[in-house]
Amino acid sequence: MMLVRVLLSPLRRLTRVNLRAGGPLLGAVLLRCLTPAWVLVRERPMTERLAQSEEAVAVYRILVALERPRPGHLDGLARSLVLYARVPFATDRFEEALAAVDESLSSVPGSRASGTQTAYALFLRAGSLAEMGRLDEALAAARESVETYRSAGTRRRDRTLGSPIMALLLSARVLGRLSRTAESVAAYLECLELLRARNPWQRLFRLQMVKAYVLLEVTGGLRALGRYDEALRTGVEARVYVVGLWARRKPEMMPERARHLTDLAWCYGATGDLRQACDTAEEAVTVARALAERDPADGEPRLALALECRAHYLGALGAPAEEQLARSELADLCARLAVTHPDIYGPQLAEALGELAELHWRADAHHESVEAWKRSVDAYRRVAERQLGLFEPELARTLANLGIKQLGHGMPEAAVVSGTEALAITRRLAESDWDAYQPLIAERLRALARALHRAGDEAGALACYEEAETLLRELLGNGDPAPYAATLASTLTDLAYLLSTTAEARLNEGRADDAVTALRSLLALARRTKHTNIHATCVSAFTRARAQDPGAVGHSGQRVTTDPFPSFVYRVPYAAAGNIRHVSVSMGR
């Protein structure tokens, strides 16, 4: 190769003197410099390759412009255009690369390109289209490149013009970007078979990085498809490349190490090995943290993924203190990332804050929990405003959770505000999908009713409970009652308690008519349900009312109904001497 490069200077002088004599020789030498026959020759610097390829294109354009160009001149122009295209392709100038490749493939009539050269041109075309976002066209070109490579016999001078492995890799990447994961994994597995079929010399020295990349992609793809056992097998094989000594000598593998260890941790967890999953996630965090210190733009997103994985398995293993630290670090990191990438990290920030809030609540740090829920609501509100309609369900859920925690922390007025907004959003969502949101409306009505009751708005609470009861009874009548029976029972119990306490409070205030109204509603509730605890609440409420002020209750009840104040009999079954008997409790008249 050194001898060939030595010939360039005299051939340039000859070409200037006699184009017909020196031009073809200069073009041939330039092409040989750009495509050495020995694959282990170290590639020349990019600037030198660009200069040589541009010179080759210029020489062959002049030769083709002659009155009677030879076929070899057309072949040289087509080849030099392809070799030129790979330089702008490698330097992210994809439009220039695409223009050169298209000219080589279609605008040089009469050229006799080899199959490998055509396949390589198609590969460059597919790669350029993919980087320009034209994925469907890129996939068609990549598949055509694969088939052309397979049908072409590789000549010695074409050994540097790619391979079916590289075309398959490109096809798999494009399929992945099109979210056709199963097809992408199949292409990667086919590529892996080709790599394993190569001779040991090539496997040892030239294709190790490619094999490592393929194993990583296969592991991630199989995990996305839920094929965790297969993902573990390829993942364990890939550890040799991303964790061992070979990887430590290649710093450029650090991002792939972090990603792979995170994927592997999720796979261990999915197959039940929680301890190994947690340990592997800890390795991923260590690698990602080191990468973030060296290159924050690349490392911090990978650190966020690793921290989320580690926090999940710390929670699964019952280590709340360590999980809280991981969640707190994750929330702080997502808050920084959301400043520049709100659509990606805004939702992750909101979710991390919600998980952190639950951990605070379980640790009896109720104030910290409420504050974290507020921050989660704010984060979801921001992303919901940016991506209309996409995150409103999560915003409603988070508002409902905030209201529940505010109520539990002794903030009923704030809970009413949060619960009211959560219910309003849920009602709006139900306009387009009533079946999906009807149970959620009932649930949020119950939560809002509790807050209204604690805030002193008994009328509002009663309206919410009654609407929730109506919705739940509809759900019970329309399908399987199992999911809603317990919810209805809890709602009716809460409603009975509300009516009982309301009656007692009205009597204490001297408002007998209002007390009787609440007692009559409680009696109606007891008569339409079979739940004995509600019957007991009703008996207790009537008994307390008669004991507290029997005259006022009786006279008020008779004024409202023109009938004597009702009596009520509650039967409690119990076992005595092997027989079932009943005790009657009567309130009298």
Image (cartoon, helix red, strand yellow):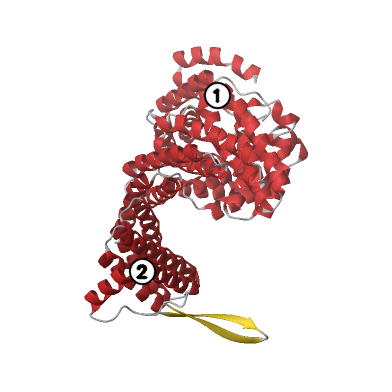
At 65% from the left and 30% from the top, the residue drawn is: 286
At 69% from the left and 53% from the top, the residue drawn is: 272
Q: Up-down: is 171 above or below 442?
A: above
Asked if residue 24 can be seen in this view, the reply is yes
Residue 526 in picture, x, y percent from top left:
40, 75
Q: Up-down: is 569 above or below 249?
A: below
Quadrant (top left/top right/bottom left/bottom right) for the N terminus: top right
CB under 8 Å between discs 2 and 1: no
Residue 551 in picture, x, y percent from top left:
30, 71
Residue 41 in picture, x, y percent from top left:
66, 25
Q: Up-down: is 131 above or below 251?
A: below
- Amino acid of disc 2: Leu
Instruction: Give the image quarter of residue 327.
Output: top right
Q: Is residue 520 left or right of residue 439?
A: left
Q: Name the residue under label 1.
A: 295
Residue situated in front as seen by the camera: 463 or 582: 582
Q: Is residue 47 left or right of residue 255?
A: left
Q: In 3D space, how far apart are the residues under numbered discs 2 and 1 (Cα atoms)?
A: 54 Å
Q: Mark 2 points at which residue?
A: 471
Residue situated in front as seen by the camera: 356 or 332: 356
- In this rendering, the count of numbered labels is 2
Q: Up-down: is 84 above or below 322?
A: above
Instruction: Give the image quarter of residue 249.
Output: top right
- Front of the two marks 2 and 1: 2
Q: Which residue lies furthest to the bottom in this view?
A: 579
Quadrant (top left/top right/bottom left/bottom right) for the C terminus: bottom left
- Amino acid of disc 1: Asp
Mark 1 burial class by Cα count in 10 Å: few <14, some 14-19, many 20+: few
Mark 2 burial class by Cα count in 10 Å: few <14, some 14-19, many 20+: some
- Label 2 residue SS: helix
Residue situated in front as seen by the camera: 296 or 445: 445
